[in-house]
Image (cartoon, rainbow, N blue to C red):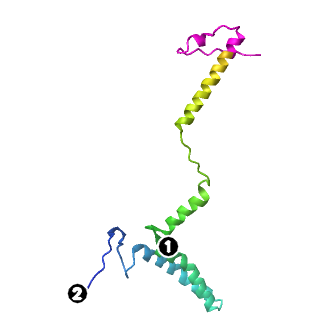
Amino acid sequence: MSAYISVPRDLTRVKSKVFFNLTKRQLICFSVAALIGVPSFFLIRKTGNMSLASMGMILIMLPFFFLAMYERDGMPLEVLMQHFIEAKFIRPKERPYKTNNYYAALMRMAQADKEVREIVLEAEKRQGGRKSEAADKPDKPRKAENRKDH
C-alpha cells in the first residue's frame, strides 16, 4: 500500500514552518498574546470572578490571534485594515476621472476663434470701417500695448 502526499499547485503560497508547525509570524503573535493575556487573567481573577477573568483574557488575546491567523488574498490583517482605513477615511470620497477630450478641445478652440473675430470686428467698427494691423498680418504676433482706460 502506498502513501499519498498532497502537494499544492501554487508553491508561492507555501510558508515555511518554524516551530510546532507555526510560521514565525504566528509564533510572534501568539507569544505577545500570551505575554499580555496571562498576566491580565491573574489580575482580573483577583476580583473573585473566574468567568470574568477568562472572558477578559480571551478578549485581550483575540486581536493578536486574528493578526496571526487571518489572511486574505495573500495579505495579512494589518495590511487589509490599512487599505480599508485609507479608502474610507483618508482618501477623498469622490475621485472624478477627467479626460482630455479632443472634440471638446476643438470646440473650445472654435469658441475662442469666434470670440477673437467678434473683438476684431468690434474694433474695426470703432475705427470707422478700417482694417486693423492685426487683421492685415494674422501670422505675426502683435506687441502688447500698455494702455490704460480711464
* Front position among marks 2 and 1: 2
Q: In this view, does 98 lie above or below 139?
A: below
The residue under the point 65% across, 16% down is 120
The residue under the point 64% across, 91% down is 49
Q: In this view, does 80 lie to the left or right of 145?
A: left
The residue under the point 31% across, 79% down is 6
Q: Is residue 124 magenta?
A: yes
Secondary element under disc 1, as helix, strand or loop, is: helix
Q: Residues within 10 Å of mark 2 (few under 14, many from 20)?
A: few
Q: How many labels does the image show?
A: 2
Q: Tell me where the magenta segment starts and ends, as one range.
A: 122-150
The residue under the point 74% across, 16% down is 149
* Rendering coords of residue 33 (x, y %): 51, 78
Q: Is residue 12 left or right of residue 148?
A: left
* Rendering coords of residue 58 (x, y %): 56, 83
* Rendering coords of residue 150 (x, y %): 77, 16
Q: How crowded is mark 1: few (under 14 residues within 10 Å), some or many (20 or more)?
A: some
Q: In this view, does 106 lie above or below 143?
A: below
Q: Which residue sits furthest right?
A: 150
Secondary element under disc 2, as helix, strand or loop, is: loop
Question: Foreground residue, 134 or 150?
Answer: 134
Identity of the amino acid at label 2? Ser
Identity of the amino acid at label 1? Leu
Q: Is residue 132 magenta?
A: yes
* Rendering coords of residue 132 (x, y %): 63, 10
**Which mark identifies residue 67?**
1
Disc 2 marks which residue?
2
- Specify which label sits upstream in the sequence, 2 or 1: 2
Q: In this view, does 74 lie to the left or right of 101?
A: left
